[in-house]
Image (cartoon, coloured by chain):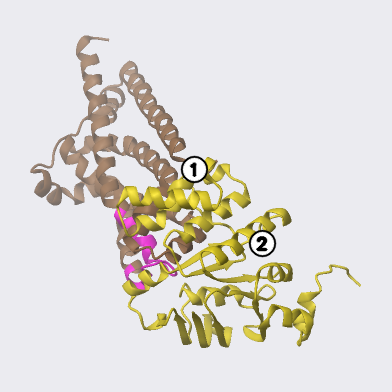
């Protein structure tokens, strides 16, 4: 393997990691509050509100229904507005974040649903305000599950980021496609696959460790 | 101290109305240990939850320490709840917090003063005899220890009233005895009014001074504990007084 190719693969790995983690971060910044709103709006919860739940749920479903490759193209005007360009790694991060956010919202909602209702009831009996319920009860109690959801999201994003190639974002997926699939260079294609597998395994390994460290339920 | 007046609660389930509480009127005085006994589904869980408005009555009045809770705004209600501690059958401790942090929880809701919180929690750890378990997580405690943490947590805001929702039903007889002893001590030493619901007549006998019997959402008998044991009026009360499980 020539030095140029190794350099190319290193750069691709960097781009994939960048896209995965930055869009992972943004998808949580957007998705986590939406998930919390969904949960708190459910019947019997502190801020129960049927129409709010339905409205938020509707938008989450709409965005989850759009295939990612179409979302990239569909969002080009918005992407241009946010990062000033529709090509490159930065441009791919926008649709990746928006694409993953509703997925994160549903994951978070489900994590919160796993909390025994008695805990919420006890907190209410002590005069807990809604915001305190979120920060002191819901998030800490669901943290091991939320970390698992983050792991799941990041691994999904590794795969999605390969599609970033469609907007010239580079990354390992793009290299694998361009050199391996189109140019049929088996060595490059297989190296790319090994690198992707390593990334996925590492994320899963670290995620499991972190989740376990937050879990005191035994 | 606590007065329920003509409290009704109706649940609507799939267009069908279920009456959970029917014209309940109870008067609980300061310093009482008031027991509410009934079999499963009698409405006692709903009844105890109306006292801190975890369940809002469909009609009637709930007066605690002279305040009609139903007239309060939601912010005022949150404050009023700090005057009413509650413990539960399944303890409901936060798994993500240590014993110390669980007891600190209700105080943290109103103050950030760490020194004050520490002092208060350490007093309570002594009261419930869990000083050595201070930094354990609930997962490492026995049922009795968990309930003692829950009691300390319920007392952290210095309430005048403590509600006990089947507090000993998940515990073995020996642990039950020690928890009941602790509740009695709290009632005497801290002058806290206790309201408890249970399906076990032995709990009433051991702890309470007054008792109400509830069946199908209605109070069918209300008296002092001695009176109830000596002279039970209704058939349901007689049934509850006879704990024998013999099938004849």
Q: Nearer the viewer, mark 1 or mark 2?
A: 1
Res B87 quadrant in image: bottom right
The C terminus of chain A is located in which quarter? top right
Q: Which residues are magenta?
A: A33-52
> Which residue is more in the foreground, A157 or B149?
B149
Counting from the top left corner in percent of width and height, residue B34 is at: 60, 75
Counting from the top left corner in percent of width and height, residue B192 is at: 51, 68
Counting from the top left corner in percent of width and height, residue B31 is at: 55, 74
Residue A39 colored in magenta in the image: yes
User: Of label 1 and label 2, which has the lower sequence position?
Assistant: 1
User: Residues at marks 1 and 2, common chain?
Assistant: yes
Determine the residue located farthest toward the front in the rendered image: B189
Provide the secondary structure element on which disc 2 rests. loop
Counting from the top left corner in percent of width and height, residue A37 is at: 33, 61
Q: CA distance from mark 1 to mark 2?
A: 25 Å
- The colour chain B appears in is yellow
Say which residue appears at 36% left-offset and 20% top-offset. Answer: A190
What chain letter is assigned to the residue under label 1?
Answer: B
Numbered circles on residues, count: 2
Magenta: main secondary structure equals helix
Res B91 quadrant in image: bottom right
Say which residue appears at 30% left-offset and 50% top-offset. Answer: A101
Task: Give the residue at mark 1.
Answer: B134
Chain letter tied to brown: A
Determine the residue located farthest toward the right in the rendered image: B248
Residue B169 image label: 2
Residue neighbourhood size for the residue with mark 2, other residues' Cα within 10 Å, grouped as few (<14), some (14–19), many (≥20): some
């Amino acid at each position: 393997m020539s030095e140029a190719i190794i350099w190319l693969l290193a750069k691709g790995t960097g781009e994939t990691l960048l896209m995965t983690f930055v869009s992972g971060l943004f998808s949580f910044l957007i998705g986590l509050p939406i998930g919390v709103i969904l949960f708190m709006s459910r019947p019997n919860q502190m801020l129960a509100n049927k129409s709010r739940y339905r409205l938020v749920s509707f938008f989450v479903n709409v965005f989850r229904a759009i295939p990612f490759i179409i979302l990239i193209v569909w969002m080009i005007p918005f992407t241009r507005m946010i990062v000033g360009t529709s090509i490159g790694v930065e441009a791919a991060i926008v649709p990746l974040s928006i694409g993953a956010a509703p997925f994160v919202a549903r994951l978070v909602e489900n994590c919160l649903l796993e909390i025994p209702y008695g805990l919420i009831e006890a907190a209410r009996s002590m005069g807990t305000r809604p915001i305190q319920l979120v920060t002191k009860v819901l998030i800490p109690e669901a943290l091991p599950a939320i970390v698992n959801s983050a792991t799941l999201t990041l691994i999904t994003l590794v795969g999605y980021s390969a599609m970033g190639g469609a907007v010239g974002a580079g990354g390992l997926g793009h290299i694998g496609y361009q050199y391996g699939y189109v140019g049929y260079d088996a060595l490059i294609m297989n190296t790319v696959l090994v690198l992707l597998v390593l990334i996925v395994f590492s994320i899963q390994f670290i995620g499991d460790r972190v989740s376990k460290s937050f879990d005191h339920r035994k | 101290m606590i007065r329920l007046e003509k409290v009704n609660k109706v649940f609507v389930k799939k267009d069908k109305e279920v009456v959970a509480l029917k014209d309940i009127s109870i008067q609980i005085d300061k310093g009482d240990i008031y027991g509410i006994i009934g079999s499963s589904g009698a409405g006692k869980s709903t009844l105890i939850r109306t006292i801190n408005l975890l369940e809002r009555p469909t009609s009637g009045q709930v007066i605690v320490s002279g305040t009609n809770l139903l007239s309060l705004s939601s912010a005022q209600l949150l404050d009023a709840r700090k005057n009413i501690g509650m413990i539960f059958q399944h303890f409901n401790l936060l798994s993500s917090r240590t014993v110390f942090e669980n007891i600190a929880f209700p105080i943290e809701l109103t103050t950030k003063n760490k020194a004050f919180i520490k002092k208060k929690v350490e007093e309570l750890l002594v009261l419930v005899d869990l000083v050595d378990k201070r930094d354990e997580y609930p997962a490492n405690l026995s049922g009795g220890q968990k309930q003692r943490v829950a009691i300390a947590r319920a007392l952290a805001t210095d309430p005048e009233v403590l509600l006990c929702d089947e507090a000993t039903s998940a515990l073995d007889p020996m642990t039950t005895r020690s928890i009941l002893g602790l509740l009695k001590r709290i009632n005497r030493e801290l002058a806290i009014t206790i309201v408890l619901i249970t399906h076990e007549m032995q709990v009433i006998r051991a702890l309470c001074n007054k008792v109400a019997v509830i069946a199908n959402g209605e109070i069918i008998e209300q008296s002092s504990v001695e009176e109830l044991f000596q002279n039970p009026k209704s058939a349901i009360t007689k049934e509850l007084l006879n704990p024998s499980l013999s099938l004849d």
